[in-house]
Amino acid sequence: ESEAAVAGIRDQFLADAPDRLLSQYAQGAICRLAGDPRVASRPDPRITTALAWMRERLAAPLRLQDVAGSVHLSPERFRHLFVAQTGTSFRAWLLWARAEAAIAAGTRGVSWTEAAQNAGFADAAHFTRTCRRVFGIAPTMLVFQPTAGTGPA
């Protein structure tokens, strides 16, 4: 696919085409590889509503069936639309959103235990294990804590 996308650019370059034409061919190649944002699908308002609904309830148990029902979709249709719109599964998105919320709270000074529980994790240990598995680091590594003698005088 990438070879086909750049073939036109190469041919025009070798033919000493003017920069204006090379630019048009390059833009076409980028759109071919990355998708043309002018023809990208519009966000489905049901998925946008569901994402907001879930963010408001991260601390509560969330089941796909319940979220689908909140936007009047069957679980199967919701699952299909969710993946198409977000590029990820429901469970992966939920885990990411919970971790993001807990990390944001922790970096604002909320204790890691409280941040984890407010984001829907069973406890701080569960949150830490999830962060290590998903991000490769413990959440405490995201907060700078100066040691004695390293701060400004």
Image: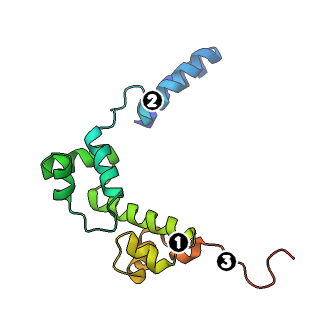
Secondary element at image label 3: loop
Q: Is residue 84 above or below residue 145?
A: above
Instruction: Return the residue at label 2.
Output: 31
Please name the residue shown 25% across and 42% down the image.
46
Task: Give the distance between the C-alpha atoms of the residues marked 2 and 1, in whole angstroms.
Answer: 40 Å
Secondary element at image label 1: helix
**First in residue order: circle 3 vs circle 1:** 1
Q: In the image, what residue type sits under mark 3?
A: Gln
Taking the image as shown, residue 40 lies to the left or right of residue 8, namely: left
Q: In the image, what residue type sits under mark 2?
A: Cys
| Depth check, front residue: 133 or 125 | 125
> Quarter-wise, where is residue 10 in the image?
top right
Q: Is residue 26 above or below residue 128?
A: above
Please name the residue shown 35% across and 74% down the image.
121
Q: Residues within 10 Å of mark 1 (few under 14, many from 20)?
A: many
Question: Picture coordinates of residue 69 (x, y %)?
Answer: 16, 51
